[in-house]
Image (cartoon, grey):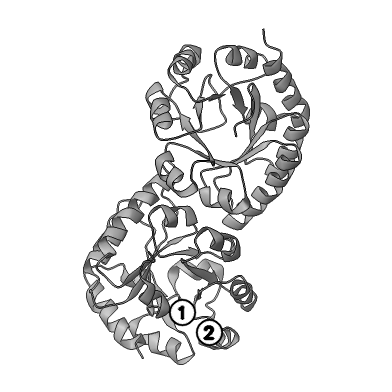
Amino acid sequence: MIPASPFLCVITDEALCPVTLAQEALKGGAAMIQLRHKSASGSQLFSWAVAIGKYCRQSEAIFIVNDRLDIAMASGADGVHLGQEDMPAKTARKIVGKKYLIGVSAASIHEALEAEKDGADYVGFGHIYPTSSKEKRNSPVGIDTLQQVFAMLTIPILAIGGINSQNAGFIISSGASGVAVISAVSRTDDPLYATRKLVDAITTYT
Amino acid sequence: MERNKELKSEMPRICLVSSGDEAGEQSGRLETQLTLLPHHLPCIVQIREKRLSTHELLRLAHRMKLLTLSKKVLLVINERADIALAAALDGIHLPENGCSPMVLRPLAPTMLFGCSVHSFEASQVAEESGADYLIFGPIFDTPSKRPYGPPQGLEKLRRLCQSTTLPVFALGGVRPENAESCMAEGAYGVAALALFMDTTRFIDTIEELYHTVTP
């Protein structure tokens, strides 16, 4: 199950040990952790996934793995997050059944609607604002598009891209169920404090 | 229904590893190889394409499966148990730094699990983790493996084959001319990549190799 809205998802950064980052983020109140690492070996990814999954269960947070459905399943993660270049959600759904959490990245209204149709449980929508964290296919989608997607979808939206403690509340008030961040937590001196500030921002917006 | 049950119980003795070029200008070689592969010739075909995205890999796996339906092929993919499941392949091949077959087996109980090993220790770990076969190498000098030091050689192959109950495929510089020496040291079969890259000679090469490794 996707966490209750509003929630914060912290995505691991290749620059840091994913397990350490996840621990700090969980202490700071993140309700979802996504393990994302494109260059690690399978055994490394698996052992990180087992460790992060354990900490997430202790904190009653949701744990998902980016792209690698096999690692997600083998490690006992709650779900998988699929990009547009990854396995189609429809295919993944056939493998894992109805109860497994499947998130899909979408960068346009079309992709978001497709994701919902393909059986995604939530859409990771963005990037909302300019960001340097990930290689980008498109220009920022902006807040207007987020509001349109919110009006058209029935599944929750996890907004991503350039979100910080200043704008996070506004994102939630625009219809997102949660926000996902990478650098806003990982590239700070104190990931725990950065997480806490973001959680405060999304839970106290007016 | 379990695919290719007979082939799994009596495994082919040749393993064709894809060239890794499916993402570049040479894409399509694997399709050519599998189209040319003689119908009578049992073969493990290992999709090993590290530069493709998951979606591209899945599409390749689907296409290659269709090409091999009428052939004696066990189609396996490097690392990705999820893709193997999605495309109903026959198995998963794990590099030495890959996930253990022990943790992936529950996801794909009927699939074949191969493991690449480069030492006695790794071979023992793979066997204890439930691997179905091993690929060991490089046995002979091969350009792609030179940066990793000298080849393991036939003597080491013999000792490795003696130390495990699993079928061992010899890899690295194996050719029809030297395949027999690997079999003589106890290898179950041979695996190759570069050997099969010249598709104009593919049928002759693989037939010749087949005759050499068939007991």
Chain of the residue displaying label 2: B
Quarter of the image where one finds residue A7: top right
Secondary structure of the residue carrying tag 1 is strand
Q: Is residue A160 visible?
A: no
Residue drawn at 31 percent across, 67 percent down: B197
In this image, B165 relative to B53: left or right? right
Read off the residue under disc 2: B157
The image's mark for residue B170 is 1
- Vertical order, A2 against B188 (above or below): above
Q: How crowded is mark 2: few (under 14 residues within 10 Å), some or many (20 or more)?
A: many
Quarter of the image where one finds residue A205: top right
Quadrant of the frame with the N terminus of chain A: top right
Three-letter amino acid code at the position of disc 1: Ala
CB within 8 Å, label 2 to label 1: yes
Q: Can residue B39 be seen in this view?
A: yes
Q: Distance between the residues labelled 2 and 1?
A: 8 Å
B59 or A18: nearer the viewer: B59
- Vertical order, A31 against B128 (above or below): above
The image's mark for residue B183 is none
Chain of the residue displaying label 1: B
Quarter of the image where one finds residue A42: bottom right
Percent from the top left, x then y, of residue B104? 55, 60
Residue drawn at 62 percent across, 78 percent down: B120
Secondary structure of the residue carrying tag 2 is helix
Quadrant of the frame with the C terminus of chain A: top right
In this image, B177 relative to A50: left or right? left
Going from N to C along the chain, the mark reached first, 2 or 1, is 2
